[in-house]
Image (cartoon, rainbow, N blue to C red):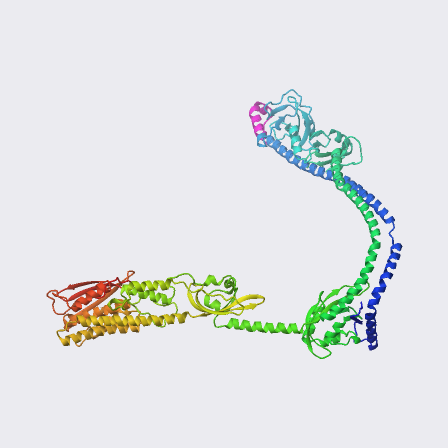
Amino acid sequence: MQDGGWQGGGGSPDTAAPAERAAGARDGGQGRRLAGLRGWLSWPLTRRAAARLRSRHRPSPLPMRLLFWAVILLPGSILVVQSWQAWQQSWSEASHEMERSAAAAAEYARRVLDGHRLLAQRANDLLIGLSDHTIRQEEAAISSQLAQLAEEAGGSPMLSVSVFDNEGEPLVSGSLLGLPRDGRYAGRDYNRLLRNMQRPRAVLSGPYEGHVTARRFFAVSLRREHSGNARPVGAYDGVINVTIRSAESSEALQRLLKNPADQLALRRADGAALAQTGSDDAAWAVAQPLLLPRMQAGARGGELRRPWSREAGQSVVVFHAVEGWDAYAVATRPRAEIIATWLSAVCGLLIFGLPSMLALLVLVLVVRHGQALMLSHNAGLEQRIAERTAALASSEERLRLAQEASGIGVWEQELGPGGRAIWSAEQYRLLGLDPEAGPVGARRLLRMIEPTDRWAVLRALRGRTPQAHLRLKRASDGAMRWLAVSGVRVPAGAGRPARLIGIAADITERHANAEALRDAEMRYRALFEVSPFAVFILDPQTDAILDVNARACSDYGYSREEFRRLSLQDIEAREVEEPRGPLAAAIASSAAAVAAGVAPLPRVGLTPGALPETPLPGQGPSALPGVTATRAATAVAGLAAAPPAASPRPRGPREVQEYETRYRTRSGALRDVLVRVQGVHLRGHNVSYAAHMDITARKRAEEERLLLAREVDHRAKNVLTLVQAALRLTPKEDAAAYTSAVEGRVMALARAHTLLAEAYWTGAELRALLEGELTAFLAPVDGQDMPQVTLEGPPVMLPPAAAQGVSMVLHELATNATKHGALSRPGGRVSVRWMLKEPAGRLTLHWSEAGGPPVEAPPQRQGFGSRMVEATIRRQLGGVVRRSWRREGLECELELPLRHPGRRDAA
């Protein structure tokens, strides 16, 4: 194929002569100039050629006539052949089914006759050693025994056991009616057959007709042996008969048949029917001359089948020998039944064959009518073909112009040795080659392709639709260009060899853009993943989480897949909570402390989530002016219940917003977060980038600093209040005593304050308070083996509010013991024991003195120390004080709550 935009040449231009390539280029140029003229001139010539072909190749009516008769005769012939096959199959199936029925009846008869022979043998065993005379005398008993044997053998009414002597007279019978002794049995064949000692011991006899009931029966007769009669060895001594009714046997044979029309008979070798179903006398009369000689000769089986005989009683007759007996099972299927089976099969063929013949006839008529219509439409069709040929030429010209405008090159390469290559003008431009020189060979093309891309190109060309992106050095300027090449393999046909047809396009700019986009994506992804704070990509309309970085998964405890199923509303902590945050919790604790009068100080620099839950110190008498517990609690409640500020959502593509909010992690922990959000346009969609910076530690540090400042203010006021009370209540009569008492009490407060400060105001150890007050008495003095004061008890951490009060109480007890009690003498002893009762959280401290000045009576008045102990333990700390003034010394028991001290007025 050549047109104005294509150049053709050999498949191996490297080996072609330059003159040949130049000639091909000139031919291509001439084709471009004559393309339009050839299209216009071809139209009238095509019409005349079509008219000549129409008259020369008009179809003959003979094939349609032959097809018509073939449609009529062929299906009929097929029906005849199938009917013949159905006829043969019907007789063959009848023969096989009768063979199976005869074999089944023979096996059934063998088992039944063998059982009856065994029954006769058991009767003979019963009569061993008994003479005929003895049997007649004991006839009733033996008859009963024979009846019992018959019942044990199956209990069927068709069975009966009888015994005859050597003259044929009945001796005993197992039947209820018995047998008459009138000589009528002497001439029966079993006496005749069994007298011959050469014959088998057991034979089939009969058929007979009963004298009383007139029913037909036959018998299994067994020669009697080992009787008590005095006869020579081998002499005939009578017979034992097991009689079988023919009617019941015929019913058993009928149950073996599948087709009710079939007949089954049990015959002796001489042809006598012992039992039979229906009446097969006519069929047996026809088959007897042919089958009886074979039966008498002892044949194992035989068959009679004459399909084309029209004699009466013609049928399929099959006989089968009963093993071990002189009898045969004869199965018969009437000819009428076989013909009925065949007609049923033929009717099925006709049901489908006749409509098919009619349908084919109608089809032939329709085809003839269609052929006539086709001839009438050929003229118009040929005219339209000529018109479309001219239109195709014009379309090819437009296609060439479109290819040049789009910059897509078209190429075609014939496969095989010497295959021709055809390129469009744009293909030459893409490769930087001269169109006048014609297509280049495969070797030069491979040299132009980047070496790393050559194997990929060769592998792609082996496929059905080769496609490849390759780098190629353009021949005209040596520039490296990216080309996208795709094609399709066209198999050989219509006199042309197999070929590859495809297109090529320059994608250098597109590839550069793709590379830049991939680099930008990698840089973005790297920054996104290594960001030191959590980054969320959100849907600005629904706040659904589209993607997160690894830091977000680490901070919030969710995996990326779990985050993609959530939205911001699922992790926001917008509900009202108590306490809402560390600051609200601290202020709420301060309000509660105003009412309770206790105030621990939280530790500075606690880890996140470890803020103390104990209340802030109470105000007491030195509370701030105008601030009451009710007003403070109301203010804090309003702060804690205030709803969080709404989190704005940026909607614009480049709008940046910053706000603080609170989110909940997967474990339930709350995080204060500074959020910066910017909307961007990503892959055709508007999304929001949100950077979450965790400011929980900063928030808590700010709250702790505020809380610490408030706590220091409260503690200073409390200490000043206690010092003021000590100054005011200490007796002032003696200046030296006054100074010593005030210094001791202030030092007690200072020691408690020091212990609390060292523990960041979380509490003070009880043992440390005691050791601070009683340090001078805890070591043995000169000349003594043990100290004057012993301390015993578990570790107990006193809350800050209780620590100051307990320190003052211990100071008063120690001062009293030093001045007036056990510690005022060298031999005095003080024992301090304490215990903590769980889970109530109550502390019991037992102070016991001994060895001091004898106590004659309790003091008549209470000094400052006693009043201070009562006020601190009972009213401030909600405890109990018990004193016992024994002669040996004071015994004091203090009991106070550590967890929730009751509210009391300050002392």
Image coordinates of residue 347 in percent, x first then y, are 75, 38
Quarter containing the N terminus: bottom right
Image coordinates of residue 249 in percent, x first then y, are 65, 31
Dominant SS of magenta comes to helix
Tell me which corner region of the image, top left, top right, bottom left or bottom right, holds residue 633: bottom left
Observer-nearest residue: 585 or 148?
585
Q: Residue furthest front?
A: 626
Q: Residue at x 82, y 77 (%)?
A: 18
Q: Quick check: 750 above or below 252?
A: below
Q: Which residue lies furthest to the top in this view?
A: 182
Quarter containing the C terminus: bottom left
Q: Please check the rendered image and state whether residue 409 is part of the magenta-colored stretch, yes or no.
A: no
Q: Please check the rendered image and state whether residue 138 is part of the magenta-colored stretch, yes or no.
A: yes
Observer-nearest residue: 101 or 696?
696
Tell me which corner region of the image, top left, top right, bottom left or bottom right, holds residue 406: bottom right
Q: Quick check: 568 above or below 480?
A: above
Image coordinates of residue 605 in percent, x first then y, are 36, 72
Image coordinates of residue 268 in percent, x first then y, are 71, 31
Query: In the rendered structure, which segment of residues is drawn in magenta?
Result: 125-149
Q: Quick check: 381 above or below 890?
A: above
Observer-nearest residue: 698 or 127?
698
Query: Residue 106 vs residue 29: left or right?
Result: left
Q: Residue furthest left?
A: 856
Tell me which corner region of the image, top left, top right, bottom left or bottom right, holds residue 262: top right
Whether residue 700 is visible, yes or no, is: yes
Whether residue 128 is visible, yes or no, is: no
